[in-house]
Image: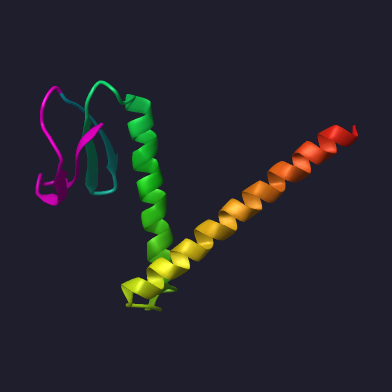
């Protein structure tokens, strides 16, 4: 179980802190640019899985920023519109992954 999620800048100032519980915990962090992404978790979670989760969070942030800013210009400021666009992108990615999985299985079946 994840016990806390924190984003801290290089000066040690928290930029985001969400605490769930603090007992019998471990932590894993990733330094990215001027921020540290810290996940605090218990023994039921895997450290490598937490590092993967941090990577997913970073890629999701990039996706959201790409919907807000394009070529240095602000495209959208409505959080509802941005989230709708991100959800549509996610659906398209899932659909394209499903199509590529089907085509691979069909091509191996025909061989």
Q: Position of residue 36 (x, y in %)?
A: 22, 42
Image coordinates for residue 18, horizontal then vertical, percent: 16, 46
Q: Give the residue drawn at x 11%, y 26%.
A: 23
Q: Residue at x 63, y 48 (%)?
A: 97
Note whether 23 is above or below 86 in the view shown. above
* Range of magenta residues: 1-24
Magenta stretch containing residue 15, yes or no? yes
Residue 68 visible? The answer is no
Camera sees residue 4: yes
| Residue extending farthest right | 111
Which is more toward the observer, 47 or 73?
Answer: 47
- Colouring scheme, one of rainbow, by chain, secondary structure, one colour: rainbow
Drawn side of residue 86 relative to residue 5, left or right: right
Q: Residue at x 83, y 39 (%)?
A: 107
Left or right? Give the position of 5 relative to 62: left
x and y, in percent, of residue 111 in the image: 90, 32
Residue 1 figure quarter: top left
Above/below status of 70 relative to 43: below
- Taking the spot 39% from the left edge, 42% from the top edge, the residue there is 55
Relative to 104, is 89 on the left or the right?
left
Asked whether 8 falls inside the magenta stretch, the response is yes
Q: How many marks?
A: 0
Where residue 53 sits: x, y (%)? 36, 39
């Amino acid at each position: 179980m994840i016990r806390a999620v924190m984003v801290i800048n290089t000066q040690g100032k928290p930029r985001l802190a969400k605490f769930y519980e603090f007992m019998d915990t471990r932590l894993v962090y990733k330094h990215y640019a001027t921020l540290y992404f810290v996940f605090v978790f218990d023994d039921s979670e895997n450290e490598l899985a937490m590092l993967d989760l941090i990577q997913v969070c970073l890629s999701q942030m990039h996706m959201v920023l790409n919907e807000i800013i394009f070529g240095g210009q602000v495209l959208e400021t409505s959080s509802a519109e941005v989230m709708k666009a991100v959800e549509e992108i996610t659906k398209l990615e899932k659909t394209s992954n499903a199509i590529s999985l089907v085509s691979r299985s069909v091509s191996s079946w025909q061989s």
